[in-house]
Every structure is written in structure tokens, then in C-alpha cells.
Image (cartoon, rainbow, N blue to C red):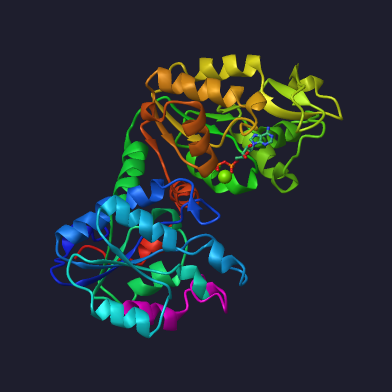
């Protein structure tokens, strides 16, 4: 068990808090402040406990000089201040005298936000390569380290894994709650347990399939990845993009788990991904100039039938090209069926989460996980570097 934020005394202590304030931005304007809001519980707890709060976060990617201004954290400090209802001191640098003196002058209950940690990536990728000198430097600014950046938990960066090597550490409320939700879901012995997988590449999901295939009762496969499975069973899928590298894996799965895997029986096909003209065809009728963009009517019926008795469902991946309304119907129908039947359902994956938020009432799901990559890794059973580096309970 990892130490929790509740395991330390913060009175007058300098706390380095790694948050995920990586919000979508356009022209330095925040488009969605969900991630800032999700960080408030931990920040407020530290304030209430008389800590001096020093926040680190990344924003976007920094590869060249022109990425700096686009990914300036300043607007985030303003929004954070509004949400906390208190001043947030913003330091426009990731190291140096200005930062050090601001940290030394910080009083209990004050909040300071440091410029985007990935500014350190401009030269030598110091943040992303977990540079030890940088990690030590950031650690030297505080007394305790709290990691609450759930979405980057699978990464090994200076601002999460690096600092944790040099300070007493714990996880914040967001990480604790996300992992508890997933653990509770996986540990609940509810059957039939159905996994719905979709999305683009089989390759990205191989480990997840391997980890879940023996735990679930049914594996429903939709989305683009279904067509690699169909192709592997000798069905002609036309122009639909298949994942060549994964054909052998699909063949093996189809032999070993024939009774568990359910594939589409019909599809919405078109000759052009940008066109709204489509036909609903059986998968054995796809022409060589067509590509499959959504599951068809018969498949929706089949999937609903399979889900009817399910007590627990895990969703990872949309069932079609849902970004385009014409091809969002399969995802919408199947996901809403789960919601309307009150089936215990966990949604993991960035695109799956946005599909649910766009097409369904998100309140009807047990949990929609916020960290795409981190959640996927956790569900795969892969250890998360950012979690491993945190102190265990004594
Ligand atoms: P997640 O982020 O939930 O793990 P993925 O990243 O694996 O999901 O895949 C999501 C993407 O897959 C979406 O952009 C969606 O449009 C695409 N997709 C799903 N089915 C199809 C399809 N039949 N044709 C084209 N794109 C598809
Ligand atoms: Mg995705």
C-alpha cells in the first residue's frame, strides 16, 4: 500500500505537489478546466492543513522554442486562483533565483505555481528523461512530495518519479480515488462480466486483451480493431485499415477463445471516410473499394442481446468513427443500452471517455476514468512508474 496524503503532518511544511493541470488550450485560453477542478480537493486539503503549497505541472509538449508560449501555464494560475478563491503566485521559470526566493518567502496556506515542467524539455529533455540533477533541484525546494497527477502516472519524469527519490512522499486524493474505483470494479465478482473493446489498433490493446480474456465471460470487439480480427478469419474487409502486425495474435485469440469473442456481423460502409453516404452491409459483402466506419443494425442487436444478462461491463474503445455523427450511432446505442440497464460499467481510455460524455449521460456510469494511458496500463496489470516511486506505508 502506498502512503496517502493523510499520512503526513503539513503544518508550515513546504509541499511539492505534482498536479495534472494539462488542460486543452487554444490561443492561451482554457477550453475545458476539468483537470484543474479535479486537483482542488488535494490543494484545499494542504491549505487547510497549513502547508506552503508549491505546485508543479506539465502542459502540452515542448519540442521547440515556438512551443513555449503556447504552453505557458500562466492562464492556468489565473483559473486556479478563481477556483480556489485565493491568489496563486505564478513563477515564470522552472528553476533559478526568482523561484527559490519566492519559495523561501512563502507563508503557510499560500499557493505557488511553477512554470510548465516541460519547459525543461527544450534542451536535453530533462523533465521527460527524469534527469537526476533536475529531480534533486526540485526536491530541494520542499519538505514533502505529493503526487496527484493521475494521467501521467505511467510516465517516469523528473517531476513525478524523480522528485520522489529525494523526499518523503504520498499520493493525493485524485490518484487514490481513481485507483480505488478501478480496484473495486475489478475485484467485484459480478458475472457475466463483459468487456467491450473498440478503437483503432489491436497492437495498443494486446496486453489488455491478454490480461482480461480469462477474467471476462465475453469479449465484444467493435471499432476499427474488429476488422483485423475479421481479416484474420479470412473475411474481406475492403479498404478498411487493418493492423498487419497483429494478424497472428488475432488468429490465435480466435482459435483459443472462439466462444468468448463476439465480432460485428454487419457494418456501415462507405467509399470515403469523409462522406456521409453509406450502406449497411453484412461483413461478407464489403466491396474492395469500401471501408467500414461503424457497426451495423444487426450487430447493435447482437451486442445488446449479449449484454442483456451482463452484471459488469468494461468499455475500452469506441465502436465506430464516432467523431463524425453519421458513424456515432453504434457507439451511442450500445453505450446507452448499458447505462439504461444500470449495468455496473467502468469506462477507460481517452476517446471512450469523450464518446460517453458526448453521446450518453455520464452520471449513469459507475466510473469514467480520466487518465487515458495511465488507466490502460493499470488495467493491463502493468506497474505504474509514478506510483511505484511513492513511499509504502510502514
Ligand atoms: P481509447 O482512447 O478509448 O482507448 P482508441 O484510441 O483506441 O480509444 O481509439 C479511438 C479512435 O478509434 C477514435 O478516434 C475512433 O474514431 C476510432 N475508430 C473506431 N472505429 C473506427 C472505424 N471503424 N473507422 C475509423 N476509426 C475508428
Ligand atoms: Mg485514444
Which residue is drawn at the image coordinates 58% and 32% (left, top)?
257
Magenta-span inclusion, residue 182: no
The C terminus: image quadrant: bottom left
Vertical side of 17 occupied by 245: above or below: above
Left or right of 286 in this view: 325? left
Q: In this view of the protein, can residue 105 be seen by the observer?
A: yes
Vertical side of 117 occupied by 49: above or below: above
Vertical side of 135 occupied by 153: above or below: above
Which quadrant of the structure image shows residue 229? top right
Ligand 1 visible in quadrant: top right
Left or right of 187 in this view: 374? right
Q: In this view of the protein, can residue 384 be seen by the observer?
A: no
Which quadrant of the structure image shows residue 106? bottom left
The N terminus: image quadrant: bottom left
Which residue is drawn at the image coordinates 37% and 39% (left, top)?
186
Question: Which of the two residues, 22 or 6, is positioned nearer the viewer here?
Answer: 22
Question: Which of the two residues, 394 or 15, is positioned nearer the viewer here?
Answer: 15
Location of residue 292 in the rendering, given as x and y in whole percent from the top left corner: 73, 29
Question: Which of the two residues, 70 or 296, is positioned nearer the viewer here?
Answer: 70
Location of residue 173 in the rendering, given as x and y in whole percent from the top left corner: 27, 52
Q: Point out the stretch of residues depicted in magenta.
A: 121-141
Seen as rendered, the residue at the extreme right is: 288
Left or right of 175 in this view: 256? right
Location of residue 146 in the rendering, given as x and y in whole percent from the top left corner: 29, 64
Location of residue 131 in the rendering, given as x and y in whole percent from the top left corner: 47, 78
Which residue is drawn at the image coordinates 25% and 80% (left, top)?
104
Magenta-span inclusion, residue 132: yes
Question: Which of the two residues, 156 or 215, is positioned nearer the viewer here?
Answer: 156
Q: How many marks?
A: 0
Amino acid at each position: 500500500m502506498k502512503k496517502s496524503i493523510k499520512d503526513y503532518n503539513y503544518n508550515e511544511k513546504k509541499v511539492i505537489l505534482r498536479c495534472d493541470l494539462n488542460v486543452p488550450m487554444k490561443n492561451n485560453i482554457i477550453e475545458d478546466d476539468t483537470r484543474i477542478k479535479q486537483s482542488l480537493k488535494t490543494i484545499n486539503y494542504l491549505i487547510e492543513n497549513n502547508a506552503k503549497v508549491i505546485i508543479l505541472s506539465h502542459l502540452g509538449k515542448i519540442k521547440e522554442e515556438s512551443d513555449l508560449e503556447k504552453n505557458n501555464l500562466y492562464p492556468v494560475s489565473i483559473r486556479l486562483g478563481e477556483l480556489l478563491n485565493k491568489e496563486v503566485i505564478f513563477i515564470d521559470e522552472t528553476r533559478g533565483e526568482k523561484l527559490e526566493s519566492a519559495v523561501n518567502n512563502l507563508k503557510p496556506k499560500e499557493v505557488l505555481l511553477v512554470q510548465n515542467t516541460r519547459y525543461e524539455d527544450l534542451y536535453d529533455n530533462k523533465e521527460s528523461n527524469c534527469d537526476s540533477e533536475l529531480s534533486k533541484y526540485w526536491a530541494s525546494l520542499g519538505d514533502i512530495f505529493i503526487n496527484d497527477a493521475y494521467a501521467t502516472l505511467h510516465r517516469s519524469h523528473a517531476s513525478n518519479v524523480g522528485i520522489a527519490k529525494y523526499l518523503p512522499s504520498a499520493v493525493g486524493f485524485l490518484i487514490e480515488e481513481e485507483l480505488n474505483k478501478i480496484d473495486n470494479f475489478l475485484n467485484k465478482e459480478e458475472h457475466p462480466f463483459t468487456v467491450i473493446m473498440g478503437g483503432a489498433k489491436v497492437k495498443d490493446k494486446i496486453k489488455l486483451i491478454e490480461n482480461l480474456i480469462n477474467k471476462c465471460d465475453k469479449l465484444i470487439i467493435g471499432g476499427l480493431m474488429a476488422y483485423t480480427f475479421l481479416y484474420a478469419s479470412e473475411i474481406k474487409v475492403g479498404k478498411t485499415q487493418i493492423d498487419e502486425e497483429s494478424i497472428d495474435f488475432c488468429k490465435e485469440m480466435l482459435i483459443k477463445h472462439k466462444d468468448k469473442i463476439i465480432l460485428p456481423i454487419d457494418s456501415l460502409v462507405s467509399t470515403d471516410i469523409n462522406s456521409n453516404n453509406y450502406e449497411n452491409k453484412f461483413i461478407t459483402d464489403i466491396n474492395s473499394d469500401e471501408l467500414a466506419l461503424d457497426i451495423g443494425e444487426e450487430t447493435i442487436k447482437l451486442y445488446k442481446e449479449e449484454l442483456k444478462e451482463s452484471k459488469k461491463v468494461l468499455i475500452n474503445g469506441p465502436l465506430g468513427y464516432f467523431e463524425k455523427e453519421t458513424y456515432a450511432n453504434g457507439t451511442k446505442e450500445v453505450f446507452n443500452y448499458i447505462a439504461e440497464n444500470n449495468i455496473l460499467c467502468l469506462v477507460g481510455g481517452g476517446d471512450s471517455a469523450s464518446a460517453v460524455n458526448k453521446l450518453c449521460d455520464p452520471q449513469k456510469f459507475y466510473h469514467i476514468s480520466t487518465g487515458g494511458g495511465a488507466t490502460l496500463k493499470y488495467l493491463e496489470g502493468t506497474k505504474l512508474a509514478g506510483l511505484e516511486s511513492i513511499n509504502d506505508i510502514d
